[in-house]
Amino acid sequence: MKRFVLFSTVIVFLVLFSPSAFSQKGGVSIGVVDIETIVKSMPEAENADKTIKDVGLKYRDSLQSIEKEYVAKMEEFDKQKGMMTPEQQKKDQDNLRAIQVKYQQFQEEKFGVQGEIAQMREKLLEPIRAKVRAAIETVAKEEKLNFVFDKGSSALLYSEEKADITYRVIDKIKRGDK
């Protein structure tokens, strides 16, 4: 993220202080939006957040249930360990490990990076992000803004196509120019 902010800042300075920026009528114009405020104003974002929280609570309850099962079996094992045969101790320890594995798998399946909650979040939030991006682009063009940044994170949310110098930089690198 820091890299992106640094890159965005460098691009803005390059555009702001390039000779073509001064020759343009009116120079460079920059807009700022507060994404957090925009999203909070959208009912569909509120509904998505509620859905994700509700499912998350349901899964947390399931995790707590598995944890309680583990604690109860562990206490029982500790109490009876002295009276068990080595085979029975091993069997009970294997059962305890199986509960731990079940807990970890459930946690990863539901809350992990690729888990069900993450997938649900992406599915519910992508249309909201697209709607916000489209609105930002429309307003930026109407207001004749060259760049729009997020007030809270300084992330670049919109830039004019003509400001993209990617291929000029690649060409410069390939030619070995300094």
Image (spheres, rainbow, N blue to C red):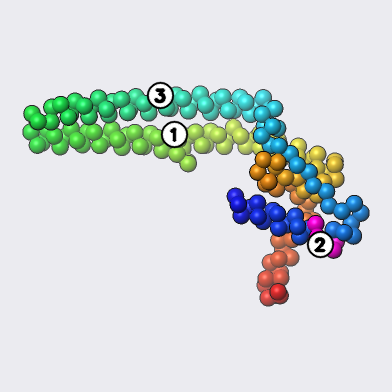
- Which amino acid does the dot numbered 1 rest on? Lys
Q: Earlier in the sequence, mark 3 or mark 1?
A: 3
- Rounded to the nearest angstrom, the CA distance separating label 3 from label 1 is 12 Å
Q: Is residue 134 visible?
A: no
Q: Secondary structure at mark 2?
A: loop
Q: Position of residue 127 (x, y in %)?
A: 65, 35
- The residue pinned by badge 3 equals 61
Which residue is painted at 67% across and 46% down in the image? Answer: 155
Magenta segment, which residues? 16-20
Q: Position of residue 169 (x, y in %)?
A: 71, 66
- Which amino acid does the dot numbered 3 rest on? Asp
- Which amino acid does the dot numbered 2 rest on? Ser
Which residue is painted at 32% across and 34% down in the image? Answer: 102
Q: Nearer the viewer, mark 3 or mark 2?
A: 2
Which residue is painted at 73% across and 57% down in the image? Answer: 11
Quadrant of residue 100 within the rendered picture: top left
Q: Secondary structure at mark 1?
A: helix
Residue in front for this viewpoint, 127 or 92: 92
Q: Residue furthest bottom?
A: 176
Q: Is residue 8 left or right of residue 29?
A: left
- The residue pinned by badge 2 equals 18
- The residue pinned by badge 1 equals 110
Q: Earlier in the sequence, mark 1 or mark 2?
A: 2
Quadrant of residue 151 within the rendered picture: top right
Query: Around disc 1, counting alpha carbons within 10 Å, would you say few (fewer than 14), some (14 to 19), or many (20 or more)?
Result: some
Q: Is residue 52 left or right of residue 134?
A: left
